[in-house]
Image: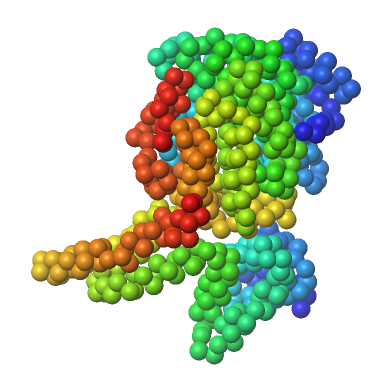
Amino acid sequence: MKNLHFDKVIVERGSEASPIYYKMRRSLAHLPFKIVDTLALDNTAIAHGDRFGTAKRTLYLTRHKGDFFKKCPGSEGQVCCNYFVINFASNCPMDCSYCYLQEYLADNSALKIFSNVYDLIDEADRMLTRHRGVFFRVGTGEITDSLALEPYTGMMGELIPYFAEQPNVLLELKTKSDRVESLFDLDPKGRVVVGWSMNPQRVIELDEHGTASLTERLNAARLCQEAGYRLGFHFDPMIEYPGWETDYQSMLEQTFATVDWRKLSWLSLGVLRQTPALKRTMRERFPSSALLAGEQVLCPDGKMRYFQPLRVEMYRKMVHWIRRAAPTVKIYLCMESRQVWEQVFGFAPACEKELGNQMAPGVEQPIHA
Amino acid sequence: MSTSAIRDYAKAKGFNRQTLDRWLGWQAADQDALEEIASSLKIGENHLRDMMDWLEEIALRDGAKIHEILARPAVFSIKTDPRLGRADKLKRIKEQLRRWRFPRLAGIEESIRIKIRSLKLPPEIRLGVPAGLEGGRLQVEFSAGSVAELGKLAQRLSEAASTSLAAEIFDLLAGRTRENERGQS
């Protein structure tokens, strides 16, 4: 993966005592650091051109004032996998053409890292302690990449030791990077899943700008597995194009040849999703992306997806190819309706808890065998 | 043609600034080709935006120019058909563009329509599918004026449900075709 390039770091006063600050001072020593009393995060200050892309070049270190621990919003009317999210940063240094953050963070696109990591841990501790009977699957990759900034922030050195000790949680670090070196000094104690968002190399080159290559992701996954981390793979967003079957089969073969599928925590499948507003942004920022020309239709939840028979066919093929190599691995669909679940698997989870509980460690029955 | 003609048209129709800017961002030949159709059919902003979306995306996918797409014989014959009024021409041109933009979706929709017709159900029973085939369910609507008629229609529907045509309709809705099944072997 190519190095990320930043122009400067802006630090909100009060964040200098954070361990994240110390790590950033060391790892980004070549960059100017400016300490300010108040952050001016309004991206309209970026005069013209690609405001969203330009915002990725300045790192902000600031305290997060709201809640860290939230239920994943999912998508209206779709089967939910009972996922929780913790946001230790906002926005992503990489630049996928389909990224929903282009719309979600359009007016708040500053690349922020939150310095008050101990507040995050306190909040998580209150939640996990209060509900010891509940199993939590918690991800950090909702509005940022979980690991892309890790060499600069050392965030995982703070989070993993805490989560590794909790009996009722799996912490998932979702990434398109290969920045895993710092994880090897930590003991995840079976409580940490490193999850890769996966696509064939062709899609990575065309639409996942600045991310690790397929081979780099898989090599990083293998190293994590060897270091005792659980693994997850998210074949999401799946992209349909002439020849996609060959590329996706090949990617799956490469995946199962690199890691031990018997130790995978889960695989998820999801097709490309866009809101009409995101599509307008994509037209402006990536006008030649072929993703704009897929046969997508507007679904009842306001997102555009490949029309149902097409995406059901895609899911069914993927499940077939996966099952051929990994017969009992857990597979679930991300943001899909009950009808689609039924057409793909022949059943839909009765409720979100059923699906969430299937992901708990020790539950070895496959979601779909 | 000139950009002033497009500006005048957009102003007269009260178009949003973004729509006008997008149109004016096209190459001159593409601008003119759309302007010719828009003026002659008096196309409003929502219809025009749909057409712009589809035209840009067909052009991107096929590596074609927008004015070339609008000059294809299928569009030309609709534009020049003396039997069609303005609204019908617009409707048919949009249908044609949608077929080009969503060829497989349109193909499945058409296959389902043909199979529904082949079931030869009485007009009191209407079968249909949702927009974009989303939901994967066949919509059934029927009306009856008496218990006897209701029974008769239910019988016809039941007979239709047991035919291979009905099974094929549901296979299409579920993305299941013989070709796909072969692809998974």
Q: Nearer the viewer, residue A349 or B127?
A: A349
Residue found at the very far left of the displayed protein:
B148
Query: Looking at the picture, does residue B13 appear above or below residue A143?
Result: below
Q: Nearer the viewer, residue A354 or A219?
A: A219
Q: Nearer the viewer, residue B177 or A357?
A: B177
Task: Classify residue A348 as left or right of residue B183.
Answer: left
Task: Classify residue A174 as left or right of residue A2.
Answer: left
Q: Is residue B141 visible?
A: no
Q: Nearer the viewer, residue A84 or B113?
A: B113
Task: Classify residue A36 as left or right of residue A358.
Answer: right
Q: Quadrant of residue A14?
A: top right
Residue located at (20% from left, 69% from top): B156
Q: Position of residue B123 (x, y in %)?
A: 26, 74
Residue found at the very far bottom of the displayed protein:
B82
Residue located at (81% from left, 24% from top): A9
Residue located at (61% from left, 67% from top): B51
Image colouring: rainbow
Q: Is residue A210 visible?
A: yes
The mark total stands at: 0
Q: Quadrant of residue A180?
A: top right
Q: Position of residue A16 (x, y in %)?
A: 77, 12
Q: Quadrant of residue A219?
A: top right
Q: Look at the image and tell me in which quarter the N terminus of chain B lies.
A: bottom right
Q: Position of residue A331 (x, y in %)?
A: 48, 35
Q: Position of residue B18 (x, y in %)?
A: 68, 58
Residue located at (61% from left, 29% from top): A259
Query: Looking at the picture, does residue A280 appear above or below residue A257?
Result: below
Query: Looking at the picture, does residue B162 appear above or below residue A167?
Result: below
Task: Classify residue A363 as left or right of residue A4.
Answer: left
